[in-house]
């Protein structure tokens, strides 16, 4: 098990993430918003950021980064629970998971589809943050059209 981060270590990581996100926001006009708060899932008040990006396949991709004392967890909402073809969609998600590195598709609240992952706090660097955000964004952009058409096929029928 990895070591618990001290308050000063966590503060350093918060500063690193804030700095990287600030530079990321300045680097392109696809960044719609960046905000920071605390998690509402626990009473620990973990630092949490959200990054809203303009997509092409999916109009908006929102990425959440949550900094714990041992890990940085990250996730994005992909789509709501499928209205049809649920078994085929689950099969496709599992097959996609087999090719992914550092992220995985999962089922969350109300059977919605998410893309999630985590890295140890000791692995947080600017390059790793770039990889994490880029992987989440690119995976959603690539997978979303096929997933949404499968899960909501009748809405796309001509």
Image (spheres, helix red, strand yellow):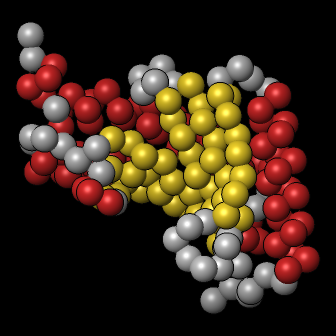
On screen, residue 21 above or below 39 = above
Q: Could you tell me residue 141's position as x and y percent?
A: 45, 30
Q: Nearer the viewer, residue 85 or 81?
A: 81
Quarter placement of the C terminus: top left
Snapshot quadrant of residue 66: bottom right
Snapshot quadrant of residue 27: top right
Q: Could you tell me residue 120's position as x and y percent?
A: 67, 71
Q: Which of 125 and 20 is in front in this view?
A: 20
Q: Could you tell me residue 8's position as x and y percent?
A: 91, 77
On screen, residue 123 above or below 129 = below
Q: Could you tell me residue 134's position as x and y percent?
A: 61, 39
On screen, residue 85 above or below 123 = above
Does residue 117 appear in the picture of this structure? yes
Residue at 51% across, 35% down:
61
Quarter placement of the N terminus: bottom right
Quick check: 157 left or right of 68?
A: left
Residue at 58% across, 52% down:
64
Quick check: 137 left or right of 151?
A: right
Residue at far top of view: 158
Does residue 100 appear in the picture of this structure? no
Snapshot quadrant of residue 130: top right
Quick check: 115 left or right of 49?
A: left
């Amino acid at each position: 098990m990895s070591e618990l981060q001290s308050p000063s270590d966590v503060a350093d990581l918060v500063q690193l993430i804030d700095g990287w996100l600030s530079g990321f926001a300045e680097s392109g006009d696809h960044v719609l918003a960046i905000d920071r708060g605390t998690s509402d899932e626990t009473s620990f008040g973990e630092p949490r950021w959200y990054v809203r990006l303009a997509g092409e396949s999916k109009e908006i991709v929102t990425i959440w980064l949550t900094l714990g004392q041992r890990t940085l967890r990250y996730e994005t909402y992909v789509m709501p629970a499928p209205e049809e073809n649920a078994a085929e969609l689950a099969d496709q998600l599992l097959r996609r998971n087999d090719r992914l590195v550092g992220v995985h598709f999962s089922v969350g609240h109300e059977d919605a589809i998410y893309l999630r992952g985590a890295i140890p706090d000791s692995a947080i660097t600017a390059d790793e943050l770039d990889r994490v955000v880029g992987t989440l964004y690119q995976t959603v952009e690539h997978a979303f059209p096929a997933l949404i058409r499968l899960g909501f096929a009748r809405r796309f029928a001509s």
